[in-house]
Image: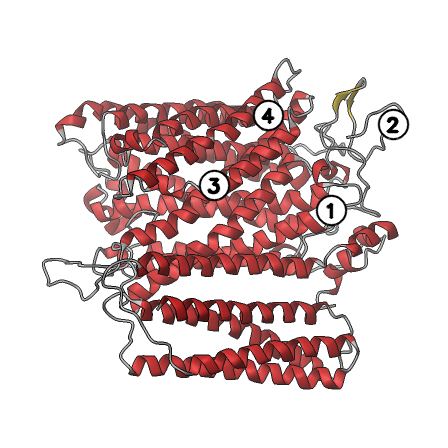
């Protein structure tokens, strides 16, 4: 039996593996949406949209949060729990800031006249695609909050790094996904 | 422990030797309702799927009554359906609602949820040698999302404007505009909600199936020693993981069109003589692309589990190794790849570029190659075999028969030129009902009869099973074979009444015949349902560990395995799953070490 366990231990942890497949699944969803955009964008009468300045700043926030998340993971592995808690908190705050900035960006666009109703165009896709990305970030923030509570709870002492690794992989993924979507819209609209 | 389910996590975190034997007291709720045991979850999927199958099947009986007897009224219909059948005749709107719900229910809730939900859950841990799924918690959530989606879908049958009625494919504008039809109002919102929950359920399940097959195999169980059931269920899960998210993105755009006023799918539309809607620049074809990018893999999501189970059951009951194991795996893989490259053959007549169409014709016809390999291997497996005609075996044979008959008409329909004549006729109905509807059902029945002893520790009644088999097989051919002729004559699908249409008057009696057979076949399925539930409680008890003499791991567990599957250690695997009639032995279990004079598999 011990041997069976050791052979399984050499493999990637099932939770990490499941996350990777889940990421593949999310990629398919956004691939579907962006290819729909490409198909529609080639039709006549497709209106374009200018990205508000704030999306550049939110990109920076997202990139920094990815960095702090990675740093948090490193601290956790080195048992620097104090540092880990601080960095986890920073990542969470940056994540929330990102969401707030996205919503601000949406309202800028909305006031500038890009709305959902009426003729098909890049703006409609922007709300749906960026909105759906924000939902995925929000899911990450909820997971961060759960880890935050666990990290600050006096009762639980846990040095298993798998949940933190899963968290950081997902966080880097939503970061990269955002960079892809941002660049996509930068060039396409 | 990452989350608080210690007794389950021990199964793969710690592997206590005595784990399988632990029988701490569980309440009824945690054992049978919110269970994290893959075997219980499988049974939950199965029984929910069976209830759906009865509802969906009954719907087909109701609309077959209309199609077979368009000039008659049935006052009792008003008693059970109320306003749906005023004066004993189904109203046109509700005829469409019945057809739509029949398709949705059978394709998604029975043959996807009920089929791969049941057998992936039940067989993957048992046949790869794992205590449970990679994440039992997610597995439980997968069922409860399915259940929630089921409740929402079911509730749409009881609202005043009725369930969605624009066809199971939910094409816009019927699905996007509430004013388009009664069913496009609340019914459609419930339909989308239910389908979104269904997609989440499929994804949670699929993630688990893939990571269990790849990560939790027991010692010695290399990928090439896996039974073909597991290969098939694995590819099914991969198909679902890659295609369902695309369907979901299509649904999200649809929701925005319905409630946000966007124009993803809508353009230049007039409803009921009013001036044009403000929507411009949208394209309904876009939805069709997104839908069929799932929709075609969905066909294989339905069919692959049936193929896998038929392979296993044919080999066990032929007492012969499966013919061409690697070819079987390779053809499953080829089907999985091709499944993603053929979706536009559902759209030949939408104005698709003919050159693009010819590419899709080529790719579609290519699927005939792996399909033919599989058929050849099934036939060579049973060739000159000493066949045991168990109920599972006869249904597996029936599956092969139906897959051949239905597959051949696919070659007609895969051709974009012939499709100009055949599209949207009864020929299409006949084709997909035989090749993926009835044949997947036969795979499912084969699986239920074969693994029932493992599920409940009892046998189902054989006599009832054989009656069920013969009536269903003969009935399926009698129902769908004549539809090919109607379709070749050009009779279109989705019409309420053909009697005033002189071209198709000649088929009046044939329609009556089809409807009568459909009612008989439906009644026979109730016999199966009775057999199933009766046998759970009163069936003949299983007394030996391995009643079919099979090589695979599930038959090394106790007759009624607990949560954790094996008492003591998980057995080690030394050989592939198909050592039947080898070296003078009837069969050699996978757990038996390779002998001195034996070649290694």
Q: Residues within 10 Å of mark 2 (few under 14, many from 20)?
A: few
Q: Answer with mark 3 or mark 2, whichever residue precedes in sequence.
A: 3
Point out residue B529 in the picture as x, y percentages from the top left corner. 51, 37
Residue B147, visible in the rendered structure: no
Q: Answer with mark 2 or mark 4, whichever residue precedes in sequence.
A: 4
Figure quadrant of residue B352: top left
Q: Are marks 4 and 1 on the same chain?
A: yes
> Looking at the image, which residue is at 34% across and 38% down?
B60
Mark 3, residue position: B339
Q: CA distance from mark 4 to mark 1?
A: 27 Å
Q: Are marks 2 and 4 on the same chain?
A: yes
In the rendered image of this protein, does residue B347 appear above or below residue A48?
A: above
Q: Are marks 3 and 1 on the same chain?
A: yes
Are the residues flagged by discs 3 and 4 in contact, CB closer than 8 Å? no
In the rendered image of this protein, does residue B264 appear above or below residue B70?
A: below
Mark 1, residue position: B217
Q: Are marks 3 and 4 on the same chain?
A: yes
Q: CA distance from mark 3 to mark 1?
A: 27 Å
Q: Nearer the viewer, mark 2 or mark 4?
A: 2
Image quarter in which the C terminus of chain B is found = top right
**Disc 4 on helix, strand or loop?**
helix
Say which mark, if any, is on residue B595.
Answer: 2
User: In front: B460, or B296?
Assistant: B296
Say which mark, if any, is on residue B393.
Answer: 4
User: In front: B12, or B32?
Assistant: B12
Q: Nearer the viewer, mark 3 or mark 1?
A: 3
Q: Are marks 3 and 2 on the same chain?
A: yes
Q: Nearer the viewer, mark 4 or mark 1?
A: 1
Q: Answer with mark 4 or mark 1, whichever residue precedes in sequence.
A: 1
User: In front: B186, or A7?
Assistant: A7
């Amino acid at each position: 039996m011990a041997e069976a366990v050791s052979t399984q231990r050499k493999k990637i942890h099932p939770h990490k593996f499941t996350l990777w497949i889940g990421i593949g699944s999310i990629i398919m969803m956004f691939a579907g949406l962006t290819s729909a955009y490409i198909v529609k964008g080639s039709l006549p009468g497709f209106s374009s949209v200018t990205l508000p300045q704030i999306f550049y700043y939110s990109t920076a926030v997202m990139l920094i949060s990815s960095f702090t998340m990675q740093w948090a993971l490193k601290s956790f592995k080195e048992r620097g729990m104090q540092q880990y808690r601080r960095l986890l908190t920073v990542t969470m705050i940056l994540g929330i800031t990102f969401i707030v900035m996205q919503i601000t960006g949406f309202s800028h666009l909305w006031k500038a006249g890009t709305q959902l109703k009426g003729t098909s165009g890049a703006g409609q896709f922007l709300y749906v695609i960026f909105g759906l990305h924000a939902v995925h970030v929000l899911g990450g923030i909820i997971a961060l909050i759960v880890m935050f509570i666990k990290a600050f709870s006096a009762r639980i002492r846990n040095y298993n790094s798998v949940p933190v690794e899963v968290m950081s992989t997902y966080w880097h993924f939503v970061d990269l996904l955002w960079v892809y979507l941002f660049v996509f819209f930068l060039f396409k609209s | 422990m990452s989350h608080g389910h210690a007794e389950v996590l021990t199964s793969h975190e710690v592997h206590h030797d005595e784990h399988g034997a632990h029988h701490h007291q569980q309440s009824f709720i945690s054992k049978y309702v919110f269970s994290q045991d893959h075997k219980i979850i499988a049974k939950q999927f199965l029984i929910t799927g069976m209830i759906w199958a009865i509802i969906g099947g009954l719907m087909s009986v109701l609309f077959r009554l209309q199609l077979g007897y368009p000039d008659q009224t049935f006052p009792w219909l008003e008693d059970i359906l109320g306003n749906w059948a005023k004066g004993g005749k189904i109203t046109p709107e509700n005829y469409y609602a019945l057809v739509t719900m029949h398709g949705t229910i059978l394709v998604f809730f029975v043959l996807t949820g009920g089929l791969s939900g049941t057998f992936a859950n039940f067989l993957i841990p048992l046949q790869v040698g794992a205590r449970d799924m990679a994440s039992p918690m997610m597995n439980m959530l997968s069922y409860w999302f399915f259940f929630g989606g089921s409740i929402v879908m079911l509730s749409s049958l009881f609202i005043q404007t009725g369930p969605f009625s624009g066809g199971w494919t939910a094409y816009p504008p019927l699905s996007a505009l509430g004013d388009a039809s009664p069913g496009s109002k609340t019914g459609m919102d419930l339909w989308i909600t239910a389908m979104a929950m269904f997609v989440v359920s499929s994804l949670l399940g699929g993630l688990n199936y893939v990571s269990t097959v790849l990560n939790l195999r027991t010692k010695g169980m290399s990928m090439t020693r896996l039974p073909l059931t597991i290969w098939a269920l694995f590819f099914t899960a991969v198909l679902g993981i890659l295609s369902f998210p695309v369907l979901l993105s299509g649904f999200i755009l649809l929701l925005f069109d319905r409630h946000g006023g966007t124009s993803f799918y809508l353009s230049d539309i007039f409803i009921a003589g009013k001036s044009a809607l403000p929507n411009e620049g949208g394209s309904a074809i876009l939805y069709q692309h997104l839908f069929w990018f799932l929709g075609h893999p969905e066909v294989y999501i339905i069919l692959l589990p049936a193929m896998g189970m038929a392979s296993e059951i044919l080999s066990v009951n032929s007492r012969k190794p499966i013919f061409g194991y690697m070819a079987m795996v390779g053809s499953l893989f080829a089907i999985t790849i091709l499944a993603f490259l053929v979706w536009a053959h559902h759209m030949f007549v939408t104005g698709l570029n003919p050159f693009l169409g010819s590419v899709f014709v080529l790719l579609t016809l290519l699927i005939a190659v792996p399909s033919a390999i599989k058929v050849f291997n099934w036939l060579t497996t049973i060739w000159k075999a000493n066949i045991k005609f168990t109920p599972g075996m006869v249904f597996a044979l029936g599956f092969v028969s139906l897959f051949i008959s239905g597959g051949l008409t696919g070659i007609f329909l895969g051709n974009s030129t012939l499709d100009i004549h055949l599209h949207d006729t009864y020929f299409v109905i006949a084709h997909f009902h035989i090749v993926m509807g009835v044949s997947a059902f036969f795979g499912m029945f084969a699986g239920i009869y074969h693994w029932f002893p493992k599920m409940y520790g009892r046998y189902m009644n054989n006599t009832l099973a054989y009656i069920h088999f013969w009536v269903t097989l003969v009935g399926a051919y009698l129902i769908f074979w004549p539809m090919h002729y109607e379709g070749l004559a050009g009779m279109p699908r989705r019409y309420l009444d053909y009697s005033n249409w002189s071209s198709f008057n000649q088929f009046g009696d044939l329609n009556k015949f089809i409807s009568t057979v459909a009612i008989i076949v439906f009644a026979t399925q109730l016999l199966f349902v009775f057999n199933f539930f009766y046998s759970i409680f009163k069936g003949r008890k299983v007394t030996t560990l391995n009643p079919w003499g099979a090589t695979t791991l599930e038959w090394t567990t106790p007759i009624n395995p607990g949560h954790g599957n094996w008492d003591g250690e998980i057995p080690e695997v030394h050989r592939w799953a198909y050592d039947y009639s080898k070296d003078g032995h009837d069969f050699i279990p996978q757990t038996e070490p390779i002998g001195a004079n034996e070649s290694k598999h």
